[in-house]
Amino acid sequence: MTSLHKKLLFMAVCVAATLPSIIAAQPPVRHIDEEDNGHGARAERPDDGTPPVTVDLTGTLRTKFEYQPGEGNARFNVRTARFGIGGSLYSNFTYKMEIDLSDEGKIKMVDANVGAKIWKGLSFNIGFMRVPFTIDAHRSPHLQLFANRSFIAKQAGNVRDVGAVLGWRSAGRIPVNVQVGMFNGSGLAADLQQYWTRQFNYSAKVQAGFFPGMNFVASYMTTLPEAVRIYLYDVGVTYQTGRWLFEGEYLRKEYAGGAFDGVDAVDAFVSYGLPVRRGAFRRISFLGRYDYLDDHSDGIAGLPGRLVINDPRRHRATAGVTFSLGLPFEADIRVNYEKYFYGHDALPGISDHDKIVLEFMAHF
């Protein structure tokens, strides 16, 4: 275990030890999700002038059994084991810290940022966070509808980094949320005490609800993983009406100087939620998804100094059913079947084959 991992675990233990006394003395606040990076947690100053300090303890655990019938292999897996705290300080300041004890088998920092409400919907966040980009890549694990993430969320648009985000929300007739960010491009892999750069990463994201039940999202991001700058463009729509939920998202990825062919990625799904009034379950959801990814490079050069294909071109169709013990999605049992389609010369990854997935998810 590295020194960073020891520090993270020590921080988690210290925080957990002090939580009972803090929580007993403070009023509860609503849940903070990953989408707003802690901006949502606010508390009004009490009438007696006491500075409010609010604490929200969160946790998410996702465990799976996966079977690949074509390969004849199977595995048990702990995909997510997150622990975090967040809340508000003095009404106008927010904070969020979260670690994942099993992010693909590794201990990783997920969030460590502080935010401030500046003026009339204008906010500022600084620290380590999810870069505001795309719809599906920005979902917290407990909000994901399928056992495995889409190609947009996993391969093409999944970025966390250290930086700052300026946000503005309008709650008018057409709700609008605008975010612009500037980031190191280092993540947490580099020694930040020795890291300096002249080449930052940038992102921008706009969300708008033009009519009830609909959320339109357009976003842009540019990154510099190594020597080739990459430009990403994303647009998507989510629409909920009654028991139906629809979503479609398209991403385009361009590489400067034609260093690699442009990449297209698509994610589209539909979900129908059926309320259940008997037994332990409260809802059964029936879901279908189609997603696609072109030959894709992560921007890191291979030999002899050229960008290589990290993920071969593929289509995937997913069918699933989810049994929910709480609403919305606080305890789920998911059964998914994924069917992959490749070209004749593709070399799929060891985990990128047709599979049946049984997942148990718990969130508090």
Image: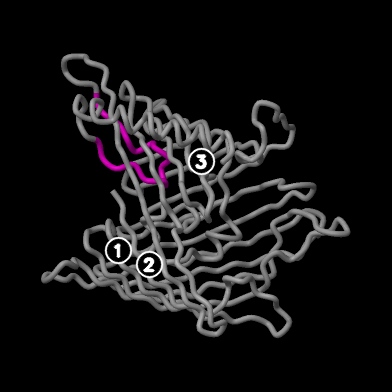
Instruction: Give the residues in magenta.
Output: 29-44
Q: Quadrant of the N terminus?
A: top right
Circle number at residue 332: 1
What amino acid is labelled 2 in the image? Glu
Q: Of the residues tagged 2 and 1, which is closer to the observer? A: 2
- Separation of marks 3 and 1 at Cα, in angstroms: 25 Å
**Is 34 inside the magenta-drawn segment?**
yes
Query: Magenta span has 260?
Result: no
Which residue is at a point 88% across and 59% down the rendered structure image? 304
Q: Who is closer to the viewer here, 47 or 142?
A: 142
Circle 3 residue: 109
On screen, residue 193 versus residue 172, left or right, reads right
The image shows residue 319 at horizontal and vertical percentages of 41, 78
Name the element at disc 2: strand
Cα distance between the residues tagged 2 and 1: 8 Å
The residue under label 3 is which amino acid type?
A: Met
Viewer-nearest residue: 143 or 125? 143
